Every structure is written in C-alpha cells, then in structure tokens.
Amino acid sequence: MHSSGPRSAVMLLRRLATLLSQQATLMASNEAFKKQAEGASSAAKKYMDENELLQEKLRDAGIEIPGVGEGAGLQEENKTLKSELKTLKEELDSSKKALQKSDSDVRAMKKQSENLTVEYDRLLEEHSKLLATSDKKSD
C-alpha cells in the first residue's frame, strides 16, 4: 500500500499537468475564435454600411444601376460572411464547452489529489505508529 501511494500521486500530478496544459490551449484557441468571429462580424457590418452609403449617393445623384438595388454581389458576399460568422460562433461555443469540461476535470483532479495527499499522510502516520509499536515489542 505504501509504494502505490507515491506512484498514484505522481500519476495524478501528471494528469493534472496535462489537463492544465489542455485548458491553456483551449483558452488560447477560444480567444482566437472569438477574435476571428468579431473580425468577420465587423467586416460584414462595414461592407453593409458602405453598400448602403453608396446606394444613397447613387440615388441622390439620380443614377440607377441595374442590380444595385438588390446588391447581388454584395448579398452573396454578405451571405458568405454570415455563414462564416455562424461557423466561427459554433466553433467558439464548442471551444467554450471543451474549456468548461477541462475546467471541471481540473477541479476534480485537484480534489482527488488533495484527498490522495491526506490519505497518504494518514497512512504514513499509521505506518510510523506501527513501526514504533513494533520497536517497543522487540525491546
């Protein structure tokens, strides 16, 4: 029992280190997805605002260009940007869920590590008492 305690503690600490590393990676990935989604969203808004402004200027100047009212090319680009934004949001949500799970795993491993340490200390104390009792009997 004595020899499996340190081995279990080392394995537990290795697992804890692995989970912490995975959590850091997920946090960085999560932040990158968030920035990418924000960039796509602001680009889409910028293009829509520019399109609106150009259409107003053309109307004010009395110029009618076929297809401008519909903005066929811009609508397609807008649709593509919205699709990309949706994908990025889904990836962000997925990363958030993975991060939450990783957080939960880390907390569980920390708790398990604390319990293992307490149990190991208790066993060491019990072992010391047994050795002391054994030494007294042999005298």
Image: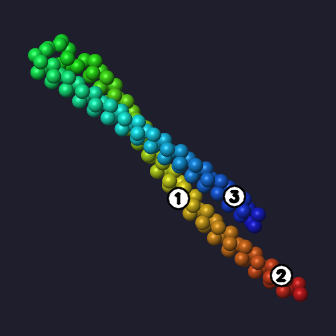
Q: Position of residue 15 (x, y in %)?
A: 63, 53
Residue name at image x 69 percent, y 58 percent: 10
Res. 58 mark: none
Distance in Å between CA atoms under marks 1 and 3:
17 Å
The reply, left or right, for residue 44 in relation to residue 65 is right
Residue name at image x 30 percent, y 25 percent: 79
The reply, left or right, for residue 90 in relation to residue 110 is left
Q: Position of residue 51 (x, y in %)?
A: 23, 24
The foreground one among 29 and 53 is 53
Among numbered discs 2 and 1, the one appearing first in the sequence = 1
Q: Which residue is mark 3?
A: 10
**Which mark lies nearer to you, 2 or 3?**
3
Q: Which residue is mark 2?
A: 134
The foreground one among 55 and 120 is 55
The foreground one among 14 and 30 is 30
Decide if residue 28 is in sight here. Answer: yes
Q: What amino acid type should be assigned to the residue bearing mark 1? A: Arg
Q: Position of residue 119 (x, y in %)?
A: 65, 70
Q: What amino acid type should be assigned to the residue bearing mark 2? A: Ser
Residue name at image x 43 percent, y 39 percent: 33
The quarter holding residue 76 reads top left
The reply, left or right, for residue 62 in relation to residue 50 is left
* Image height of 123 relative to 95, above or below: below
Q: Which residue is mark 1?
A: 107
Q: What amino acid type should be assigned to the residue bearing mark 3? A: Val
Kind of element beneath mark 1: helix
Kindly indicate whether the residue at mark 3 contacts the one at mark 1 (C-beta within 8 angstroms): no
* Image height of 10 relative to 62, above or below: below
The quarter holding residue 67 reads top left
Residue name at image x 72 percent, y 77 percent: 126
